[in-house]
Image (tube, rainbow, N blue to C red):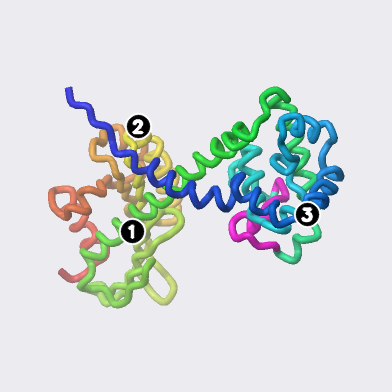
Amino acid sequence: MTIIVPPPDAQIDFATALTGIRSQYLQDALSETVRTLSVPDIDKELAAHVPAQSLTTLAAHGLRGEMVFPVPLILTANPKLLGYYRLLYGYSQKEFYTTSTGLGRFKGMEERGTLRRDVVKDIPDLATALCLAGALLIGGIGAAKISAALLDDLTLLTLGPQLRGGANVRKGAAGIRTVFNAVHEIVKASVKTRTDSQMEIVNATGRKVLIEFAPDPDIIIREEMRPNVYRQIIAIEVKAGSDFSNIHNRIGEAEKSHQKAKANGYVECWTVVNVDKIDLTTARRESPSTNRFYKISDLIAATGHDYQDFQDRVVSLTGIKV
């Protein structure tokens, strides 16, 4: 029996990223910011925004109030620390920065460390709302369990999925780029212009064909019939995740994208996956809108029956000269 353990590449990347994140968003960043401020002024704001019982609970464990509770002085001095409190309270960016929470306009604080002029006046209200969440957190954990180590652990528990999600986004983008480049290799003799996200070719009939990145599906190919009127030719959805156990969920996501593409008039819908051992019978059942399934490994190798099929169909459907 052969046992194969994949290299822990993601965890290595996380460890590298964590060093920078600690200095920007976690307890290290909070301590550095507090060092530049007046502690009596911070205490005054804590007294104004935080229930006395919560501050007493923290003090009993030798912890200062700002470890859990943001105040306007701290958020103004270092807007990125909004990210620390978000992580501590256990909110993902997706659920935190929304119009329904009213927090969407504060996102630039965490991401860029900036305070827009139109939100400065709302920082006290932001602090009050966050401190209420902090009080609920303290009450829910219980006084006996509070410690600096636990608070750090809580931020890391929220951070982990965020880092993994970022890694998945990067992997997805790399997969889309790989497919885009594979198409370019096939049509490059007919390419007239190319940017990072679009190729323009001229086919055998003299018509312009655009091959472009798109939000949904990932890559689209369109032929211009007359100025600004297009025939939708191919929609390509790329699922670059290499986790075999999740491949069927990803194919389900591709199906949703292709249903939209079909409704928008695309003739062919292709799904490109990054898993070599895929049951095509099951895949076709899970995504009936997919006309063809291809594997990234075949497109990279640029050989074999499936690659030849991919190449032939790109040539035929775009109508380029060969």
What is the crowding at mark 3: few (fewer than 14 residues within 10 Å), some, or many (at least 20)? few
Mark before the other along the chain sequence, 3 or 2: 3
Q: Which mark is residue 245?
A: 2
Q: Which of 15 and 306 is in front in this view?
A: 15
Kindly indicate whether the residue at mark 3 contacts the one at mark 1 (C-beta within 8 angstroms): no
In the rendered image, residue 248, in percent from the top left (x then y), is placed at 36, 35
Q: Is residue 36 left or right of residue 236?
A: right
3D distance between C-alphas at marks 3 and 2:
53 Å
Q: Nearer the viewer, residue 217 or 104?
A: 104
Which structural element holds mark 2?
A: helix
**Quarter residue 114 falls in:** bottom right
Given this view, does label 3 or label 2 mark the residue nearer the observer?
Answer: 3
Mark before the other along the chain sequence, 2 or 1: 1
Kindly indicate whether the residue at mark 2 contacts the one at mark 3 (C-beta within 8 angstroms): no
Q: Is residue 114 magenta?
A: yes
Instruction: Give the magenta range.
Output: 100-115
Given this view, does label 1 or label 3 mark the residue nearer the observer?
Answer: 3
To which residue does mark 1 refer?
A: 177
Q: Check the picture and name the quadrant holding the N terminus.
A: top left
Which structural element holds mark 3?
A: loop
